[in-house]
Amino acid sequence: MTGTSTYVVDVVRPGMPHARFVRSPVARVRISGIDVSRVLRLDRVHGVFTAQDPNCRVREQWYTFSGRDDPDTPRPPLAEDAAESVDATHAGNLVGEPAGRPRADVAPDFDRAPNEVQADIELPPGTLIFEDPPVHDIHRRLLARVFTPRRIATLEPRVRAFCRRALEPVTGAERFDLVEAVGAEMPMRVIGMLLGIPEADQPAIRDKTDDTLGTVDGGRINHEDILSTDAFKDYIEWRKQHPSDDLMTELMTAEFEDENGVTRTLTDEEVLTYCSVVAGAGNETTGRLIGWFGALMARYPEARRELAADPSLVPNAIEEILRFEPTGPFTARHVTKDVELYDRTVPAGSAILFIQAAANRDPRRFEDPDRFDIHRVTQHLSFGVGAHYCLGAALARLEGRIAAEEILKRFPGWDVDWDHAELAQTSTVRGWKALPLVIEGAR
């Protein structure tokens, strides 16, 4: 099966601030009369564009791989059954990724898997996203007690109070960084409340999580840092003597039947792992969602004005933001046994990448998928599907909705200072590290 690559590049250029160029290796594309080859230079070894025109700046770039040149080749089923919807756009953000990743113009080779995928890391019990049944189901049920939609809904007054407190220092400002003011602050307070972490200690735990997920050019993730639970050890010891109504206390006292049929409570190591997983997932993904809200509302001001005039549209807008710019765009796995996918054998030992962001733009599932539409009614894959569906989905939706409502009350109009906006470079999530808003009508 042959394949080609398509590059999608978001460029900032005077007079055309949000131009999106699409280029494939077999065609030179002109958009709005501009010769792409004069604007961009492609590093074919690393598959990364740089600005050739000194007046341009590459803001974001993606590539997609299409392995269906033959019209007779069977197409895969709908998006929820085929996370490898490879001919959809936005296959993944490539800005700042290590130079050693595969070339964008080479078809995937299932016979080779990167050594780092087979790192032989021993994961502690309670790392839900890497567990299989029956252990996964047992551990998941423990957390599911806490993250039911009904129970999460009772948190709204406290979550809204955290959001208002985060916005108070910037109310009336002419400009501020949305990520710094709200995206990094509000989710941290919510997760800290759930875990029972003192407010004074919450920023240190958040920063440690950010550091462990961050990457640098040419570097690798330190799995020892990722799996470290040291940040919570002191709190668990203290909570044993001072039980409360928080998640940490509930995890320590809940009885369950383990995979060996033994009724028991969680070990300290298991509680630590649970807390680390919840803290990492809750801080990172929800913070990125708030950033994408700010960015997309600046890019689509008509949608922003609609939401400001009618807040009842906000919940559906949050779903469209999650579809359009998912905070977790892909999931990588190591194949443990041979498996048949679309008439091909993926052998054991292979690396496989499921690109949820591409499935969210599958044209067979979504009409006009590259159009941002806050009225679209859809079921996206940003929270996953099946056994590993995101336990924190209800909490993320609640926080996203409240943040949108409170921001729009105070700031019905804004733009983004794109020259100083910066995407975070991380191993797992995609979103803004800095997003400076310029407030319309501020004095």
Image: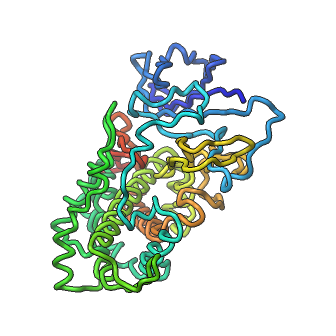
Instruction: Name the one closer to the observer, 18 or 264.
Output: 264
Instruction: Name the one closer to the observer, 67 or 437.
Output: 67
209 versus 370 height, above or below:
below
Residue 232, position as x, y percentages in the image: 22, 67
Instruction: Name the one closer to the observer, 27 or 205.
Output: 205
Instruction: Name the one closer to the observer, 269 or 42.
Output: 269
Q: Residue at x 27, y 51 (%)?
A: 224
Residue 137, position as x, y percentages in the image: 51, 72
* Residue 363 visible in the displayed image: yes
396 versus 293 height, above or below:
below
Q: Residue furthest front?
A: 260
Residue 74, position as x, y percentages in the image: 80, 41
* Residue 167 visible in the displayed image: no
The quarter of the displayed image where residue 387 is located: bottom right
How is colour applied across the structure in the image?
A: rainbow
Question: Does residue 423 appear to the left or right of 49 in the view shown?
Answer: left
The quarter of the displayed image where residue 293 is located: bottom left
Q: Residue at x 50, y 47 (%)?
A: 332
Residue 334, position as x, y percentages in the image: 51, 47
Q: Residue furthest top?
A: 38
Q: Quadrant of the N terminus?
A: top right
Q: Residue at x 66, y 38 (%)?
A: 87
Q: Residue at x 58, y 24 (%)?
A: 105
What is the number of callouts on the image?
A: 0
